[in-house]
Amino acid sequence: MSTIRMTAAQAMMRWLSVQMTEDGDRFLKGCWAIFGHGNVAGIGEALHGIGDTFPTFRGQNEQTMCHAAVAYAKTHRRRQAMAVTSSIGPGATNMVTAAALAHVNRLPLLLIPGDVFANRRPDPVLQQIEDFDDGTVSANDCFKPVSRYFDRIMRPEQLMTALPRAMAVMTDPQNCGPATLAFCQDVQAESYDFPKAFFEPKVWRIRRPEPDPRELADVAELIRTAQRPVIVSGGGVLYSGAEDALAGFAEALNIPFVETQAGKGGLAAAHPLNFGSPGVTGSACGNEICAEADLVIGVGTRFQDFTTASWTAFRNPKRTLVSINLHPYDAAKHMAVPLVSDARVALERLWAALEGVRFDAHDPKARTDWHAAVEAVTARPEADGPENLPTDAQVIGAVQRVATEATMAMCAAGTMPGALQVLWQAARGGYHMEYGYSCMGYELAGAMGIKLAEPDKDVVCFVGDGSYMMANSELATAAARRVPFTVVLTDNRGYGCINRLQIECGGAEFNNMYKDSDVQPEIDFVAHARSMGVHAEKAASIADLEAKIVEARARDVPSVILIDTDPVPGTGAGGAWWDVAVPQTGGPERLEKARNRYDANAAFQRVYN
């Protein structure tokens, strides 16, 4: 057997560089890295030596580097991904939040944190976590519950089993998620005679599982005998590339559909059967058809609580739930009738089985009425200027009016995700939302990841002042790399979204808005953003915001546009109940009233068929 001698770290990077997609491109497009004593000598030197074919990207924070990598993979519909490496200790644990985000969203991410010495000679090393009862534990054990695959590399030859397993998980549409390879720092530098055959390029195919014929027949019969079906289109539609199949199926049977946060933008908002969104941040017309539906057909959705309005959205006492999903775990949730299959294949098979079936139950006027309501709440304020603070809905309207087919609206946490889902009229492929984990701090790094993945997109990042303050440092990375995108920074002087929820739950305004907390900073966001090398300015009005967004498209660095907003109003349209528990006893009258509202809404919950 022909072999080649190299260090374990060199072997890892060389192997990763030759894992290919069916399109002939590398699956992993490079590695984000911040070096420390747990990875600089081994992994760092290995990355330097392979830089021409497997590039290294330098970021400012381990968590936000991961966010950029996740956004990149999401934009590529899981067909490509990135790796991220950190030192042992705080660099590694900084990545745990991002690992959870990738896990919840079913997105591929390769994490390579440095680890303790396998030989244990210098223990305890700097930054080492010691378990008094278990000598095998390190800080990297934190990754186990948030990884789809976890391994600790304690011998060079273990790479030959660990690396293929990690790739198998990241390219498996059913089990896709983050893979963590904790790499002992002494092992990184150890040499080994690896078989040359191990480094031959390998093509990874994304499987399309066919449905079980019996499950397919059961679901076809349920659709055939339904009176008022509705389709709930989730992120699985996008990852499967099932957009055209969904459109054809819905049009052939005349079934209206609603889109989840992950599924939004699969088909354009202008599609005549697109009734917007369901649930907590749902459109009025979407929630109306969901409430009346006797058959709910979920396609590639987890039926998360925002989608189901905490299981109050589907109120028809005769309703049946169908779940088309790749993983039996998701397909069987809430006693749904499962159809375990790739979304595109399932829709195509159902379409063929239901030839000639057509429904007439929904009211098209409800959809046009809803669009008129959206236009009203997103219109420019009559008095437009600094004395009249705009709502978030009016900010969305400003961006919408100057949007093009290339515009990609993105966000992650706070007020804007809900407002965007219910109000933003997305072009096909024009929406990117991280709302599986709703992670504050994803926005700016995520916008950079999207733009790296799709340079021709006009990426518009909506971010509130709260999320901006949590994680803004990758603006410096984007400026240095000349990665342009537009940031619409809404300053409502605190956590306005949670403040509204606090009030709705009967609570006193406390610790969310700066005016109600023990700190009241005066932040010059424009000066701060400029200090990182981006273009930054403040919009004086909604009309000014529109003009500045158009101007930003000509720049080769990020543009941050600050606008002050009113923290009090919500979206002004759509919406439904969300189950956030309210204290049962011990509170003032405002809490008692909130609890009564809570109990009244909870009475509509239908968790099972």
Image (spheres, grey):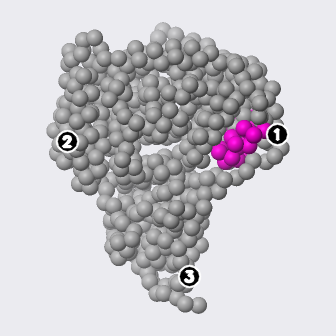
Q: Image height check: is 341 above or below 86?
A: above
Q: Position of residue 481 (x, y in %)?
A: 26, 55
Q: Residue at horizontal 76%, vertical 29%?
A: 357
Residue furthest to the front: 356
Gap between marks 1 and 2, in whole Å? 57 Å
Query: Quadrant location of the C terminus?
Result: top right
Of the two numbered discs 1 and 2 on the same chain, state the one appearing first in sequence: 1
Q: Is residue 329 visible?
A: no
Q: Amino acid at mark 1?
A: Ala
Say which residue label 1 marks: 217
Q: Which range of residues does the magenta coloring cover? A: 331-353
Q: Amino acid at mark 2?
A: His
132 vs 120: above or below: above
Q: Which corner quadrant holds the N terminus?
A: bottom right
Q: Residue 55 at x, y = what percent? A: 36, 66
Mark 2, residues whose alpha carbon is within 10 Å: few (<14), some, or many (≥20)? many
Please tell me which residue is depicted at 40% across the width and 52% down the height of the picture.
453
Is residue 272 toward the left or the right of residue 337 in the image? left
C-alpha distance separating marks 2 and 3: 50 Å
The foreground one among 334 and 207 is 207
For label 2, the residue is 535
Residue labelled with disc 3: 197
Q: Residue at x 50, y 65 (%)?
A: 24
Marks 3 & 1, CB-CB < 8 Å contact = no
Pick whichever of labels 3 and 1 is earlier in the sequence: 3
Label 2–label 3 contact, CB within 8 A: no
Instruction: Specify whether residue 252 is in view.
Output: yes
Residue 185 in the image, given as x and y percentages of width and height: 42, 72
| 465 drawn magenta | no
Q: Residues within 10 Å of mark 3 (few under 14, many from 20)?
A: few
Camera-nearest label, 1 or 2: 1
Q: Which residue is painted at 20% across and 19% down in the image? A: 386
